[in-house]
Image: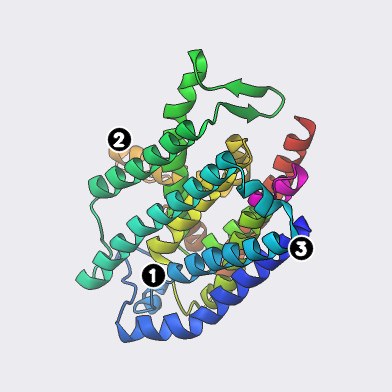
């Protein structure tokens, strides 16, 4: 029944996200919520100017409605998803993850809104965005601590007590982890279908991990996220009819982080999310190296633009990055299974 619950979550998320495009995209066009393009970006991206953005609300709607539908089915059939949420601890961890992702999505929404209203590719200031993201991240971790999260698991090492001693270092590291991955997913959203495709593969990986450990709630949540990403690809695949904007990319980042914590093994996101990490580090390296030498390591950062400027098509970048995520996901699965 657990697997069928996940199937329903994925199917509903896909249907809601796909069908909502027929309503949301024309509405965004009427509001003239079109994407602006950085002048320093690839010249061939100028044709994307005016494409509706903030389409991430389609993904959010797909995930939330799918989780509600899957919960209803789970209650009727008595599957693990609903049973797990009867436990205060599981319910608290689940809701804190969802609200954290929604909080990140809300920050992205305000950022997108400022961009489209001012008709420039700048939204919230870096300080404003950093403060809000760190605030949401800290509140999420505080909630987990108050819920009674006492350990974190590292494959081949085992459970580590995070309530005292050296284990307390987990919390500041986790703060950087939540903040960093949310922004890394945001940086990955730069080509048609890239962030949604990579996250689709990553969500499927978490669905398998949760299924392996019998985590019905995590299994259904990952399935809903995968279904929503697949539904968004229908509209976001090149040539994109809509962009997810920071609304979507920051929500996706929050969801991937929440899924990693729901497994009790957040460290596996470091492997599954290798593309996110590479994208973020390419920007950090580019900025640091340029400040020191006034030269660039990459033709353009994030690194997906470097490959574009080397002659790769957007479709090739998306395909290669998705395959890398798939390989990394398989590796993560093996490490989780062998390192129990």
x and y, in percent, of residue 220 in the image: 66, 56
Q: CA distance from mark 1 to mark 3?
A: 31 Å
Mark whose residue sits in front, 1 or 3: 3
Residue found farthest to the top: 165
Number of numbered discs: 3
Percent of width and height locating residue 61: 49, 69
Question: Does the segment drawn in magenta span residue 212?
Answer: yes
Q: Which residue is mark 1?
A: 54
- As drawn, is 197 to the left or to the right of 60? right
- In the image, which residues are magenta? 208-219
Element assignment for label 1: loop
Residue assigned mark 2: 292
Say the numbered circle drawn on residue 4. 3
Between discs 1 and 2, the one toward the N terminus: 1
User: Disc 3 vs disc 2: which is toward the camera?
Assistant: 3
Q: List x then y, in percent, for residue 226.
A: 62, 61
Earlier sequence position, callout 1 versus callout 3: 3
Q: Is residue 322 visible?
A: yes
In the figure, residue 331 lies in which quadrant?
Answer: top right
């Amino acid at each position: 029944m657990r697997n069928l619950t996940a199937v329903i979550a994925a199917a509903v998320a896909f249907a809601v996200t796909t069908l909502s495009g027929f309503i949301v995209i024309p509405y965004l066009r009427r509001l003239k919520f079109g994407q602006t393009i950085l002048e320093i970006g690839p010249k061939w991206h100028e044709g994307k100017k005016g494409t509706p953005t903030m389409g991430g609300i389609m993904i959010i709607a797909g995930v939330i409605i799918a989780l509600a539908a899957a919960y209803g089915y789970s209650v009727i059939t008595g599957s693990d998803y609903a049973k797990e949420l009867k436990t205060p601890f599981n319910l608290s961890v689940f809701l804190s993850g969802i609200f954290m992702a929604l909080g990140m999505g809300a920050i992205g929404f305000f950022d997108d809104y400022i961009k489209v209203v001012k008709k420039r590719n700048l939204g919230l200031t870096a300080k404003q965005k950093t403060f809000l993201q760190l605030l949401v991240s800290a509140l999420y971790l505080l909630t987990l601590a108050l819920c009674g999260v006492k350990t974190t698991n590292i494959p081949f090492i085992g459970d580590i007590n995070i309530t005292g001693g050296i284990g307390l270092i987990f919390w500041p590291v986790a703060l950087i982890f939540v903040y960093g991955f949310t922004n890394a997913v945001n940086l990955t959203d730069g080509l048609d279908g890239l962030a949604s495709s990579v996250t689709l593969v990553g969500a499927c990986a978490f669905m398998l991990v949760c299924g392996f450990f019998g985590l019905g709630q995590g299994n259904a949540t990952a399935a809903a996220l995968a279904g929503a990403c697949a539904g968004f690809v229908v509209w976001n695949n090149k040539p994109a009819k809509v962009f997810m904007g920071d609304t979507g990319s920051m929500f996706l980042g929050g969801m991937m982080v929440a899924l990693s914590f729901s497994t009790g093994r957040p460290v596996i996101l470091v492997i599954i999310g290798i593309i996110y990490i590479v994208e973020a580090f390419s920007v950090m390296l580019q900025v640091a190296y340029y400040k020191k030498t006034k030269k660039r390591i990459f033709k353009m950062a994030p690194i997906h633009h470097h490959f574009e400027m080397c002659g790769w098509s957007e479709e090739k970048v998306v395909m290669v990055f998705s395959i890398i995520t798939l390989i990394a996901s398989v590796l993560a699965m093996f490490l989780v299974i062998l390192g129990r």
